[in-house]
Image (spheres, coloured by chain):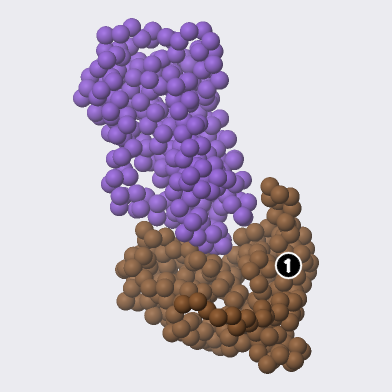
Chain colours: A purple, B brown
Amino acid sequence: MLLHDTAVLFGRYARQTLRSPFQIFFGTLMPLLYLFFFGPLLTGLPLGREGDSWQVLVPGLLLQLGLFGASFAGFAVIMEKNWGVLERLQVTPVSRLALLLGRVLRDAALFVFQAVLLVLAALAMGLRAPLAGILIGFGFVALLTFSLAALSYVLALRLPSPQEFGPAVNTLAMPSMLLSGLMLPMALAPGWLDVLSRFMPFRYLVDAVRDAYVGHYATPTMFYGVLVALGLTALAVTVGTRTFRRAGA
Amino acid sequence: MPIISTSGLSRTFRTRHGEVTAVRGIDLTVRPGEILGFLGPNGAGKSTTLRMLSTLLPPTGGAATVVGHDLLRDPAGVRRKIGYVAQSGGVDPQETVRSELVLQGRLHGMSRTEATARAAELARDLDLTELLDRGSTALSGGQRRRLDIALGLTHRPALLFLDEPTTGLDPGSRTALWTLVRRLRDEHGTTVVLTTHYLDEADALADRLVIIDKGVVAAEGTPAALKAEHAADTLQDAFLAVTGRTPAPVEHAPVAV
């Protein structure tokens, strides 16, 4: 029931995405611009971390792609709600969890695909990293986008107008990006900023991916990264299912 | 055995300005095979009642049994037996008529083959066959409405809820929709509960009417009985008498041109 419904809905949303190449590629635009026009500035700078500047920057850009892409996913559900599609689906016996998972799995698949494009471009720019590390990076992108997309749907159902939803997401996403050291590692930060950034869960994800990109897979940083990623996923599924189960949502 | 029975069904909304009671307590019995019309002024609680009976909105008080399933304890059981067509429908403009019909069947547990066959059958029944591969945005108002209803009928529900099904339709499409509702009842024994603001529609289509006002059932009966009870010539007059709204006096002031 859950598997069948999730597969059916995933298929519908995946087909909608495949019909819109713009939607597929647009999300890579911002990180690609950073890669081409910001990345070369870092090549000679001491970044306070092991590895060359691409091994530090590309993990940050991967999470930036996930952060900005997935946190706006909720717009789709605002549209579905306005068209009456969401209500129509809710009156069928479809599993409530499938209503969430079908969408979120499509989103995670889309963002991992974009992450692959970004890494291919980064290889052309000069990134060299172990394959296992790159694959681990995609794993983190998958968990992050899965969780953020789910939380974005929850927010969209609570703030049902695009005029409120857009600014609310921006207000959350911008400080998240800056405080997690996505662009430059927090190793460069003064003490107070470093402390502040430790309250930002995404910091642990980007640090873990940076470790993976230099071939360190069994570090405390990796452990914390995995812990935070799984914690976010559990939180997102719990809150998401509860919201989709409440009939009025 | 009634197909719907409710007792004291009520719904209170919490808003910034305190609590608002949309439905105070509805006691209702609907027999299988009836065409029941909900009438009532805007904001009377018709749509809220329909949304509660179709599991979209949890009641805050009272109880109901819908097609043999308890509304509060077994909403999933209710969903398998009912169809619900919202006032504005529920079609995704990015999809074709066919893909919407097939999805609906799949979500009701049909295999791809069954859902495809059912989509073709519904299209034949509701005169949508020529439109199956059209985008849903390319449909006229009447065609859109037939698609909405086809979606609600996918799983052959015993009970169909229609929220203001003819609002915005031209007279031809309205009459066609009345014929369809009667056919559903006569050929399949489907019970139909619909809301409307058109009293001619209520008079012509419904076997029995329930007038809802201020969140309670203010009157119920056949159109003829309601008229007789209020010594009214038309349903319009009976409706106004029940809801306590007297017609505004017509002023014959000169009209500036």
Q: Chain of mark 1?
A: B
Which residue shows up at 68% across the image and 50% down it?
A: B15
Left or right: where B165 falls relative to B10: left
Tell me: residue A26, above or below residue A38: below
- Residue A236 visible, this orientation: yes
Which residue shows up at 37% across the image and 50% down it?
A: A14
Residue A88 image position (x, y, % from top left): 52, 62
Q: Front-most of A145 and B20?
A: B20
Which residue shows up at 54% across the image and 67% down it?
A: B86
Query: Secondary structure beneath disc 1?
Result: loop
Corner quadrant of residue B111: bottom left
Mark 1 crowdedness (10 Å alpha carbons): few <14, some 14-19, many ≥20:
many
Tell me: residue A18, above or below residue A28: below
User: Which residue in the structure is indicated by mark 1?
Assistant: B215
Residue A30 image position (x, y, % from top left): 32, 31
Which residue shows up at 40% across the image and 28% down it?
A: A63
Q: Front-most of B188 and B133?
A: B133
Tell me: residue A81, above or below residue B251: above
Left or right: where A148 falls relative to A29: right
Q: Front-most of A108 and A75?
A: A75
Tell me: residue A38, above or below residue A231: above
- Residue farthest along the left direction in this orientation: A124
